[in-house]
Image (spheres, rainbow, N blue to C red):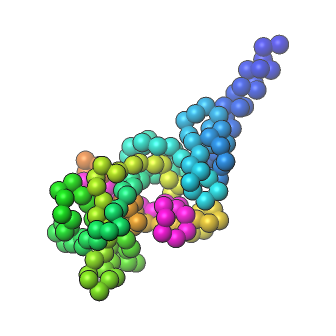
Amino acid sequence: MWRAPLVALLLFAGCGHNIGDSCTTNVDCSPTGDRFCDTSAVNGYCTEENCGVSSCPSEAVCIRFFSPIDTEPCHFDTASSRSDCVHVDDRCVCDRTDGNGECSTFTAAGTNGHCAPSATERRWCERKCSSDGDCRAGYECRSTGTFGADPVPTFDLGAGQPTKFCAPTGRSS
């Protein structure tokens, strides 16, 4: 008699979506509450917030995002790892990378990004990918270092390990 409810509970607990799957409510992603549905993303995006280097599930990677100030363009010099942002705690968020994942300059003024306060950092588990075919419809395989997305730093690699993740097609992340 008690076995049927226990089996139903175990089956229900195992019914969660993977990171990056579509969703409309938090329960779609995890009935136990360890994942939630980011409804600001195209067709929803199952994710985990405030992740660390190794805390995301195997299908995902932890990515940190910064919100750039669109009115403060900057230039990031990859050779010296310095930018021309005025405020000490600001970082130059790359707007676009070249084929090698390097921040590319594409304006007449020589800027390649926008300043973003370090305090705007937010971390999310994002679906790993190696090409656009690994992502669902409406998403592309994007490299870190673009549009305010950076890898999470580690002790061995202060800047973090560059990686690719599924993000909504186009500029918004």
Look at 39% across and 55% down and name the residue there. 65
Left or right: 120 in relation to 76: right
From the viewer's side, name the closer residue of 76 and 117. 117
Can residue 12 be seen here? The reply is yes
Look at 39% across and 60% down and name the residue there. 149
Quarter of image, res 84: bottom left
Image quarter in which the N terminus is found = top right
Left or right: 82 in relation to 131: left
Residue 163 counted in the magenta span: yes
Residue 102 image offset from top left, x and y in percent? 32, 73
Residue sitting farthest toward the bottom: 108
Residue 23 image offset from top left, x and y in percent? 66, 49
From the viewer's side, name the closer residue of 144 and 171. 171
Residue 153 image offset from top left, x and y in percent? 30, 51
Residue 42 counted in the magenta span: no
Can residue 94 be seen here? The reply is no
| Dominant SS type (magenta) | loop
Report the magenta residues as a range: 158-173
Look at 61% across and 31% down and name the residue there. 32
Residue 89 image offset from top left, x and y in percent? 21, 54
From the viewer's side, name the closer residue of 26 and 141. 26
